[in-house]
Image: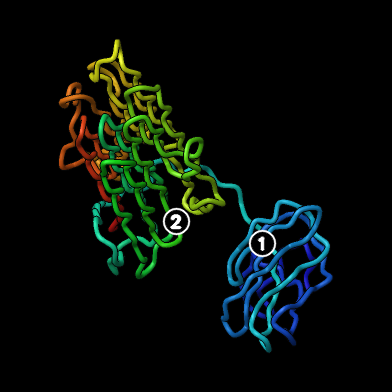
Amino acid sequence: MAGFNTIPGVSGGGGQANMTFVASIHMTTYNRAWTQGGTPGYYGMFSANQENGYIYFVGATTTGGPLNRLINVNHSFTSINIIAPQNDMVSLYKAKVKDTALFNNPFSQFASFPSIIRSSGNFVLPNNALPLVNVLIAGAGGGGGGNRGGGGGGGGVVKLTAYQAVGTTSVTIGGGGGGGGGYGGNGGLTYFGNVYALGGGGGGHHDHQGQGLNTTGAIVANGGGGGGHNNRMTGGTGSVQTSSTGLGLSGSPVYAGGHRGGDGAISDNGNNHTRGGGGGGADGNGGDGHYNAGGNGGPAHIDNTIASGYSFGYGSYGNAHHNHGSNGSHSGTSYGHGGHGGHQGNSGAGGDNGAVVVRYYIP
């Protein structure tokens, strides 16, 4: 057998020349610990029965990955833990790979098509498309609060580049938060497979705070605006998603969100013309409410690569006495936006549902 860190010859037994065979083990139980050391590099553990499973390379740190895949282990290890079906045989190989340079703008070489999804179901990749897609996932907007209410926060946005999609991927579209005479409801989560984007927070109503982590404990992408009248009610804060909270690690995930809603305004000399704060948007904070002015929602996220011509996650505006200061609107190409707050004695508007845009490529 060739040395552990050398490239084996192929003249005798065939095989792939850049893969050095280390050893094989039998899975007498589904959970085995193998005392096998190694230096940093690319490794693959392959199932003789082509079964699914998982392996962990254990050293000062631990790196895990699925069977039948090449894994970059950037540390030395002293043992390998394996979870796989009983009575399978798994074989460890170390790969030698050459240095390469980045291939810039690879998708520009192909025709591309956006699939815009607004209802839950499945995305089916065309048979002639590349198995890599670019995806934008938008959470649903929060509802506006009632009676001088704050605007609803926009849904968060998650973008995935060169994300592996083969066959069918489940899609769940989050529902917009309901508007009300009290608090606006929080927007729902939108899923593409296991990756999700948070919904926006609901706006606060007459003398109540906007929904967010700092005010009501709600985990939302962007906080709702605070209600206005007798007290300056604070807007809710948004949350930043990470690899352990919906983003995952595949597809170089990028998140837009984590912004706060604006504060509601206090009444001036006993009049009722104050206004709720604007909801936070995917790309910025909501504005504070003022006497007959202010309180606009935070800006949406605009992406010209995956979903050109569309915007996602506008925060919506707060409202006041007799609809004073109702600035801003949302077009038919704006998805996941918050609902505006209701003016005196009226309910706020509901938030918009979430969306998924999958751009696929055909050679």
| Picture quarter with the N terminus | bottom right
Task: Give left or right: position of 214 versus 315.
Answer: right
Q: Nearer the viewer, residue 79 or 178?
A: 178
Vertical comparison of 121 with 302: above or below: below
Identified by mark 1, the residue type is Gly
Residue plotted at (39% across, 27% down)? 285
Does residue 318 show up? yes
- First in sequence, mark 2 or 1: give its number: 1
Mark 1 sits on what residue?
Answer: 64
Q: Which residue is mark 2?
A: 195
Tell me where residue 75 appears, x and y as whole percent: 75, 52
Residue 47 drawn at (x, y percent): 62, 79
Residue sitting at x 18%, y 22%: 324
Instruction: Name the quadrant containing residue 291.
Output: top left
The image quarter containing residue 181 is top left
Q: Is residue 24 left or right of residue 310?
A: right
Residue type, mark 2 in image? Val
- The reply to whether residue 136 is in sight is no
Query: Up-down: is 40 above or below 338?
Result: below
Label 2 vs label 1, nearer the camera: 2
User: Within 10 Å of the Cα at label 1, are there few (<14), some (14-19), or many (20+) other Cα atoms?
Assistant: some
State left or right for residue 330 relative to residue 229: left
In this orientation, which residue lies closer to the viewer: 225 or 45? 225
Mark 1, secondary structure of its residue: strand
Question: In x, y percent, where is residue 259?
Answer: 43, 32
Identify which residue is drawn at 74% across, 79% down: 24
